[in-house]
Image (cartoon, helix red, strand yellow):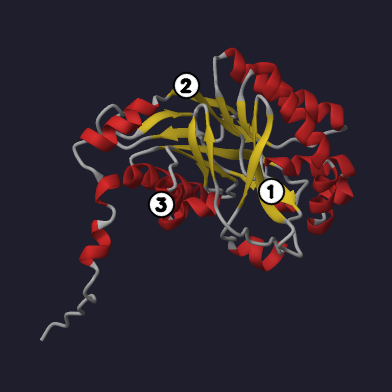
Amino acid sequence: MKIAAAAYPLDFLPNWDAYAAKITAWVTQAAEQGADLLVFPEYGAMELSSLGGATVAADLEAALHEVMRHARAVTALHCDLAARFGLHILGASGPAMAEYAPRPVNRAVLYGPSGVIGHQDKQIMTRFEREDWDIAPGQGLQVFDTPLGCLGIVICYDSEFPLLARALVEAGAEILLAPSCTETLAGYTRVKVGAMARALENQCVSVHAPTVGAADWCPAVDMNTGAAAIYGPPDLGFPEDGILAQTALNAPGWAYADVSLETIARVRREGAVLNHAHWAEQEMRLSRPVRKVTPA
């Protein structure tokens, strides 16, 4: 299969038609390159807040509700595009109301040629989401068994916590999707290192899709730094640096890479190291408490 990861800029849009035209153009471009799986970034949906006007987009709370107001139309658009091109698309995440939370969660929806496959809510909130924006944490992980393989989703900060990804891999995930939205180079680097580490320790592919560029009209996503990339373990069948594809920093566009499930299975079976198989040995080595040694 061919995977496409988006380095996606946020635009102040004059109307819904402009948003629909933008998403359609991005999907069409990737489809014309032969992509089978498209991954859009975390909080890419926040550009919909501009449809409420500058005052709404500039207000953290009002922006959330303006984005959610367009949820049905967003779903219909992505379902149509996935069906038209025969693609799987992880749509840009955004706020959504969940039955288990009084506040909006950060939700990424997975679409297939036959419609909505499911969604994943972000599990662990950053300080900004906790302390300023009041975004609720998700409750539980899912894997999606698709014709392209078994997919797991670790949204931005979630990718920095190895046990979340490991739970997905133990449930069958072969490809981890890591949409992100990071303001600084340091923030982008944290997610990049996390995504690469998850590919290494689980001997799988991880797909990093960030927002890029300035959007100073919306304080929630006013500055965005990143590069889209697709990573694998630096071992048998994969590049020695673990990078299958990567865009230039802060350059909008798609990163494309061909990925084989058999290559993932083979590196787990025959790699120079077998991190995936040896994961359980950590528990064995930690069966005794860690000793603290103090110099005399």
Residue 20 percent coordinates (x, y): 79, 27
Give the answer, above or below, for where 187 lies relative to 228: below
**Alpha carbons under labels 2 and 1: distance apart:** 32 Å
Query: Do the numbered discs 1 and 3 sit on residues whose CB atoms are within 8 Å?
Result: no
Q: Please, what is the three-letter code of the amino acid marked with disc 2?
A: Met
Secondary-structure class at tag 2:
loop
- What residue is at 69 percent from the left and 56 percent from the top? 105
Q: Which residue is mark 1?
A: 221
Please identify the quadrant where the C terminus is shown: bottom left
Mark whose residue sits in front, 2 or 1: 2
User: In which image quadrant can residue 124 be found?
Assistant: bottom right
Q: Nearer the viewer, residue 286 or 220?
A: 286
User: In which image quadrant can residue 231 be found?
Assistant: top left
Q: Residue 166: which disc?
A: 3
Q: Which residue is mark 2?
A: 1
Give the answer, above or below, for where 272 lies relative to 167: above
Mark whose residue sits in front, 1 or 3: 3
Query: Do the numbered discs 2 and 3 sit on residues whose CB atoms are within 8 Å?
Result: no
Q: Please, what is the three-letter code of the amino acid marked with disc 3?
A: Arg
Which badge, 2 or 1, is on the more N-terminal residue? Answer: 2
Residue 39 percent coordinates (x, y): 58, 33
Q: Residue 190: which disc?
A: none
Q: Please, what is the three-letter code of the amino acid marked with disc 1?
A: Val
Characterize the local packing of mark 3: few (<14), some (14-19) or many (20 or more) Cα atoms within 10 angstroms: some
Residue 278 percent coordinates (x, y): 24, 50
Secondary-structure class at tag 1:
helix
Secondary-structure class at tag 3:
helix
Which badge, 2 or 3, is on the more N-terminal residue? Answer: 2
